[in-house]
């Protein structure tokens, strides 16, 4: 056998071994800890079976609300980021002046630090001296001024709105690349047949863009399920009890208070959600995709 053909195989095996050592084994160990009473208050580990998971899905705890918040955040932001990103992508693939400038402006929020964005918007949405409420009062719209981050009715919606603002430009950029990769001959043929703009979108752009939309959907779902920094910076899970708490902020707090087993159990639940929802969405989104 030619030695030159053996080297790539060694690289593959080496990368696989590294992946198993650094990712697979720690993940399995972490899942194993979720079946114990691991905590900062005991030196000995005791196997407790499914007790941690029973506690998570018990109505006596806040965990069900935390899981609901996580799923609500994920699905809402995923749908709106894809929808707004698609609208912007369609608009910014037209022949308009300063096209690249407009694209850059829309993409800019996604390159900023999430924690920095959270801190800025925490100041903007401050109910007393925040820029938003100050502006609304200055133009006579006092009735629209609200306690955006300090009331249970508005806090979660405000957090999702900020995250959608931050991430839409990134999704737009991916969808622009998908639209520009579609051959122009399809549109020329459709124009000859008398198709209007909506018909071109329905029968050409959208079907051929489905693989790209599947990618952005999965990316958004993964981000939504593991969101932490935006929630932490804006509300830290408040106001009140688990109003905007999500899985990762709950894991962070459980580890911070020494409840390691509860934290790893929550991480395991999140991992299962990511696999199931991601697989389901890929199957749905690619079911009727069209390949050029």
Image: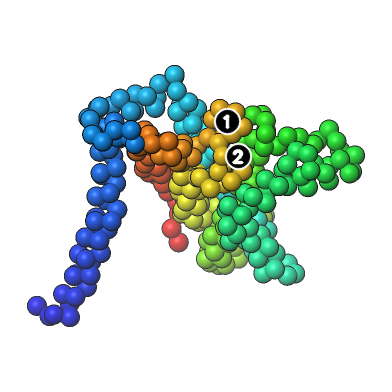
Q: Reading the chain from its start, which is encountered first: label 2 or label 1?
A: 2
Q: Would you place residue 238 above or below residue 170 in this image? A: above
Q: Secondary structure at mark 2?
A: loop
- Residue 73 locus on image (x, y percent): 54, 38
Q: Quadrant of the N terminus?
A: bottom left
Residue marked by disc 2: 235
Residue drawn at (78%, 39%) of the image: 128
In the image, taking residue 54 as reference, residue 201 lies left or right, namely: right
Residue drawn at (58%, 61%) of the image: 111
Q: Secondary structure at mark 1?
A: loop
Q: Would you place residue 154 above or below residue 3 in this image? A: above
- Residue 288 locus on image (x, y percent): 44, 47
- Characterize the local packing of mark 1: few (<14), some (14-19) or many (20 or more) Cα atoms within 10 angstroms: many
- Characterize the local packing of mark 2: few (<14), some (14-19) or many (20 or more) Cα atoms within 10 angstroms: many
Q: Quadrant of the C terminus?
A: bottom left
Q: Would you place residue 177 above or below residue 227 in this image? A: below
Report if residue 153 is visible in the image.
yes
Report if residue 165 is visible in the image.
no
In the image, taking residue 71 as reference, residue 25 lies left or right, namely: left
Q: Quadrant of residue 30?
A: top left
| Residue 243, numbered label | 1
Q: Residue furthest top?
A: 60
Residue drawn at (54%, 64%) of the image: 177
Q: Is the image coloured rainbow, by chain, by secondary structure, or in one colour?
A: rainbow
The residue nearer to you, when weighing 180 against 197, is: 180
- Pointers 2 and 1 in contact (C-beta within 8 Å): yes
């Amino acid at each position: 056998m030619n030695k030159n053909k053996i080297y790539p195989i060694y690289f593959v095996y080496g990368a696989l071994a590294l992946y198993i050592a650094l990712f697979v084994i720690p993940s399995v160990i972490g899942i194993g800890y979720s079946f114990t009473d691991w905590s900062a208050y005991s030196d000995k580990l005791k196997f407790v079976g499914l007790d941690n998971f029973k506690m998570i899905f018990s109505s006596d705890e806040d965990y069900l609300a935390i899981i609901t918040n996580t799923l609500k955040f994920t699905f809402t932001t995923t749908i709106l980021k894809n929808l707004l990103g698609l609208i912007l992508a369609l608009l910014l693939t037209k022949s308009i002046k300063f096209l690249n400038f407009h694209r850059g402006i829309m993409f800019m929020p996604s390159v900023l630090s999430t924690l920095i964005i959270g801190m800025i918007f925490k100041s903007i949405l401050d109910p007393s001296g925040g820029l938003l409420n100050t502006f609304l009062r200055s133009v006579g719209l006092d009735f629209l001024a609200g306690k955006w981050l300090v009331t249970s009715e508005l806090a979660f919606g405000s957090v999702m709105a900020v995250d959608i603002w931050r991430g839409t430009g990134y999704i737009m950029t991916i969808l622009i690349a998908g639209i520009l990769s579609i051959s122009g001959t399809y549109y020329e043929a459709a124009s000859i047949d008398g198709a209007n703009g909506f018909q071109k979108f329905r029968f050409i752009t959208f079907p051929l863009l489905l693989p790209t939309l599947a990618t952005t959907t999965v990316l958004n779902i993964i981000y939504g399920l593991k969101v932490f920094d935006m929630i932490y910076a804006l509300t830290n899970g408040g106001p009140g009890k688990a109003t905007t708490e999500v899985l990762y902020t709950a894991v962070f707090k459980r580890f911070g208070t020494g409840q390691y087993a509860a934290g790893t159990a929550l991480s395991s639940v999140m991992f299962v959600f990511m696999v199931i929802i991601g697989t389901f969405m890929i199957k749905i989104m690619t079911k009727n995709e069209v390949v050029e």
